[in-house]
Image (cartoon, coloured by chain):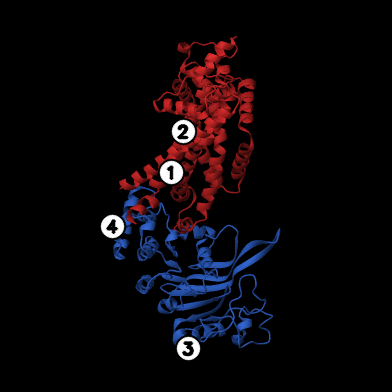
Amino acid sequence: MIDKKKIAKFLGYKIVRFAILLVVVILLSFILIDMSPINPVNAYISNMVVGPEKIAKLEAYWGVNQPITVKLMNWLGNILTGDFGTSLIYRTPVLQVISEKFTASLILMLSSWVISGVLGFILGVLAGFKRDTWVDKAVKVYCYILQSAPTFWIALLVVMIFSIWLGWFPVSGGVPIGALSNTVSFWDWLRHLILPAFTLSILGVASIALYTRDKLIEVMSTDYFLFAQARGESGWTLIKRHGIRNILLPAITLQFLSFSELFGGTVLVEQVFMYPGIGQAAVSAGLRSDVPLLLGIVIFSAIFVYVGNLIADVLYNFVDPRIREGEESG
Amino acid sequence: MNDLINVSNISISFTQYVKGLNQRELKVITDLTLDIKEGEIVAVLGSSGSGKSLLAHAILGILPHNANLSGTMMYKGEVLNSELKEKLRGDEIALIPQSVNFLDPLMKVSDQVIGECKDEAEEKEKRAKQRAIFEKYGLSEEVDDMYPFQLSGGMARRVLVSTALLSNPKLVIADEPTPGLDEKSVEETLNHLRQMAEDNVGVLLITHDIDAALKVANRIAIFYSGYVIEVANVDDFSGEGENLLHPYTKSLYNALPENGFNLTLGHQPLHGEIPSGCPYYDRCDHRLENCDKIRPNLISIDENKKVRCFKYER
């Protein structure tokens, strides 16, 4: 059985690490924003004509001229009570914006994460198994092109081909333009999801496929693989019994570690497809000086990426029998 | 006794890149000739790292892709080509590998030993057999569910031997089965090999452990720089070594602690720097006129003995 003490130690260590990470992320982003010429008052009044005495009042309300330490303390105090402030562009509480946008993005990210993981793994196994044949070369060329092409460029190509030339899918948006939220059907929503998810998937395939290929080739040159051959195993069963078994766990771990790239890719892809998710919200918050929303998104994306890494660590430390049972007996 | 396997004039080489795009052929095994009869143990004795294991891989047909193999092999009078090798390996020809590294680290021991099964009936039958063999080697039921890293050195050795027996092989190739084991485990492993030979299985023992070879083998092939320089009966390694033929074998025998500890200067030429004449030329004290120019062939002295030396050519 899994050692409880070991888990407690592991989790304790992870929580401390997480706290340090959050503090550093918060401090850095807060200092950076404070140093930038962003002014919440301008963001709030945007195009309205407002008199100077009103501006002075607003500045006092937001504490624009307070020292950074006071601002930081105020903000941190509010966060600890669960108040992330109010978004200046959406005019709703930050937490509500984030939960809405994150849900929309989560479906996009999750579907492309699963598709790219499965597809990338299959392609990697095929390429490794059929090493140096045309299958392998085709997979490698595909992966190298995708690895070196910028995300937004691929996204634009996808829009051009599937939306403009073929007309199969809408060009952009999360729902049809002008539709009321209660008239939007599941199918409408799905049609808008497919292209961004597809773009993210084909982009995510490259790293996992190349990694799986290399790992399989490595396994195929090990002594135990040789011995399995010597015992008469061959072909696909051999790959299945001794190859996939040994590369699956590292591949899944890598896929969890790729949460940060997934998030970065989502920001760009949502921008190109105007998909109303967390990535687009982050870009608008940045461009339109919505400080509370921007800081909120920074914190939640840090948590998101950290959870991905944590799952990878857990898999690595508690699922592999060599590490799991080895710790127990020794 | 019938011939089980005849290996004649086997050479194994690798294409290697040296300086940019220049290739060269690196010969690891040259002109190897060997035969094993049913119920006989033949040891191939050579220093570690000299490429002896490749002989095992060549017989099983699992050489790496960049290896070139030439020469002929006959198995029970049939040409042993790659199709036949594929059919026989894991069945009539079994390998006992060197170390626990040859077991899949993520698979339970019993699952590996039984190998792939077509259906449940086959699996049941193989499991029963595996249990019986494990029982014979004193491996308790707990061992079935262990992962390779949980095995002790002696247990791992017994598991590896068991893998060979599951298919009732006719030829067992034991590749360095003794290094790193304590005396008792060595004795135990050698006993397993003896038992197999008693059951009329031919055993090819690849080793650098001369003691182990002398204890268990019927005949010993001496491997020097990729060449077999002599095949001798185990009885020839006795007395003053007067029945041994090749100067290297004699000096090897005399270098053993119990035979005087006499050291011959020099070392075996490495792969790639083997002279065009006899590989033993620069250390030999019986040099003849042509030894440095022409490489001697392996000649048969009688049915069992062979030597590669001009002294014995008529």
Q: Determine which residue is flagged by label 4.
A: B141
- Crowd class of label 3 (few under 14; some 14 to 19; many from 20; radius 10 Å): few
Residue A76: x %, y % from top left: 44, 28
Q: CA distance from mark 2 to mark 1?
A: 14 Å
Residue A134 in which image quadrant = top right
Residue at x 50% of width, y 27% of height: A295
Q: Are marks 2 and 1 in contact (CB under 8 Å)?
A: no
Identified by mark 1, the residue type is Asp
Residue topped by disc 3: B260
**In the picture, which chain is red?**
A
Q: Secondary structure at mark 3?
A: loop
Q: Colour of chain B?
A: blue
Q: Is residue B124 left or right of residue A220?
A: left
Mark 1 and mark 4 on one chain: no
The residue carrying mark 1 is: A313
| Marked residue chain, label 2 | A
Mark 2 or mark 1: which comes first in sequence?
2
Residue B251 makes an appearance in the image: yes
Q: Are marks 3 and 2 in contact (CB under 8 Å)?
A: no
Location of residue B67 (image quadrant): bottom right
- In this orientation, which residue lies closer to the viewer: A239 or A120? A120
Q: Which residue is mark 2?
A: A304
**Do the residues marked 4 and 2 share a common chain?**
no
Q: Closer to us: mark 4 or mark 2? A: 2
Instruction: Give me the C-alpha separation between circle 1 and circle 4.
Output: 33 Å
Which amino acid type is shown beneath numbered disc 4? Answer: Glu
Q: Which mark is residue A17?
A: none
